[in-house]
Amino acid sequence: MSTPDAPALADIRPCLEGAIPAIMATCATDGTPNVAYISQVFYVAESQVALSFQFFNKTRQNILANPYAAVLVLHPVTAAFFRLHLRYLRTETEGPVFEGMKAQLAGIASHSGMAAVFKLQGADIYAVEQIERVAGQALPAAPARANLLTALRRGSERLSRCCGLDELLNAALATLSDFLQIRHAMVLMLDAASQRLYTVASCGYANSGVGSEIAVGDGVIGVAARARTPVRIVHMTTAYLYSHAVRSSLRADTPELALDTNIPYPGLAQPHSQLAVPIVSAGRLLGVLFAESPKELQFGFEDEDLLVALAGHLGAAIDLMQAGTESAELTSAAPSPQAPAPGNQGAALQLRRFRVNDSVFINDSYLIKGVAGAIFWKLVNDHVRQGRTEFSNRELRLDPAIHLPDMSDNLEARLLLLQRRLAEHSPHLQIEKTGRGRFRLRVDRPLQLHEVAA
């Protein structure tokens, strides 16, 4: 039983960061004790932790026969010891806790030179029945981080003032930079049909990487999306090659290789801390909010908690914004007929579309593919054939040629991706928002369209 002055598990969360191995004591049914080091004591809930199951050794045998254990953990700053009295509940081999432990263990293994040895077999879930503060002289505690709640409040206020997706994503990244000193971050949205995430906004990188893709399940970002759980690592990780998985996931093993549609991923070449948080609304995965740093031990559990809260607000705001836009589309009149646009001056832009994946090239330079590519091709076709420049989101949703997956697919994100790719790579073709659910295609050069069947 806990004593009145016993600390709560939340009070000793720094002990569970994996910086210092814990010591675990178990007992066989005949009373023989066994003591061993363990790699992880992972915070699960207010009264539960998970321990890493890596080897079928004496500790494992004891726990399966006698479910009680004691674990000694050390505070990495104050050097205070705490003893956790635990009772084994179950082992999980998949799901959020397992994926979070697996990612964290990869960092620990790489940092300690044990990448070839450490392999997570399962996450053993334990109930925390008592926590003891071990007698001894502790060092002074580090000053509490100030203004985290203020940072969350200011970020929340920024998001609540936004009226468009572009503004919303910029506000989320600015919150990380201005209030948390997170200089490298990005937002990726989910393409549910292909099970890939595409970058729609970033900050702190030499190249924005807008349009770069990551498969669900690849790297820190993909794992966070697949398991719908925060994934945080605080050491340089080579065991699972998280920093390079994104690049390897873009290996050209499809016909796209010949089309050179690989947009460079904007991430740091050698990150030492990474934190990926899923963006979820109403039970649906919308995307991932990702931060990284060239420094080790940069993101603690408080940063994780704050980013989870921010991502929750961001997800709700994206859903509400999309619902508002769709409602406005239903009540707005269709664009009025337009006279053909006057001839543009200068050399014609050569636009090619490959039907196999709707990839579009402008003067042999890759622009976009997929649903965003199909949207772009409709716009330029209507412009060339009818002289149109004014368009609405609603007509895109209703056009079967675009193959928009369903109404829950975020069309605003597709248009934002296209808008930003054009802004970076084609100054003579731009998309300008003209109202809720409306936009204009600005064309400064003649267009010549070519379709390639294969």
Image: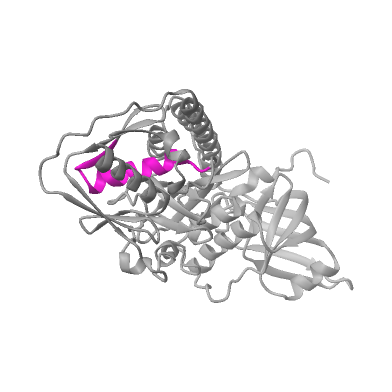
Q: Is residue 248 above or below residue 188?
A: below
Farthest residue to the right: give it.
30
For this rendering, which residue is in front, 314 or 230?
314
Compared across the picture, whether 94 is left or right of 399 comes to right
Residue 423 belongs to the span the image colors magenta: yes
For this rendering, which residue is in front, 337 or 221?
337
**Residue 312, image x, y percentages:** 55, 38
Q: State whether the magenta stretch is mostly helix, strand or loop.
A: helix
Residue in the picture at 49% in, 72% down: 113
Compared across the picture, whether 23 is left or right of 192 comes to right
Q: Is residue 173 above or below residue 272?
A: above
**Residue 226, image x, y percentages:** 57, 55
For this rendering, which residue is in front, 302 or 444?
444
**Residue 303, image x, y percentages:** 51, 43
Residue in the picture at 39% in, 45% down: 200
Please provide the residue range marked out in magenta: 409-431
Answer yes or no: is residue 202 visible: no
Image quadrant holding the C terminus, namely bottom left
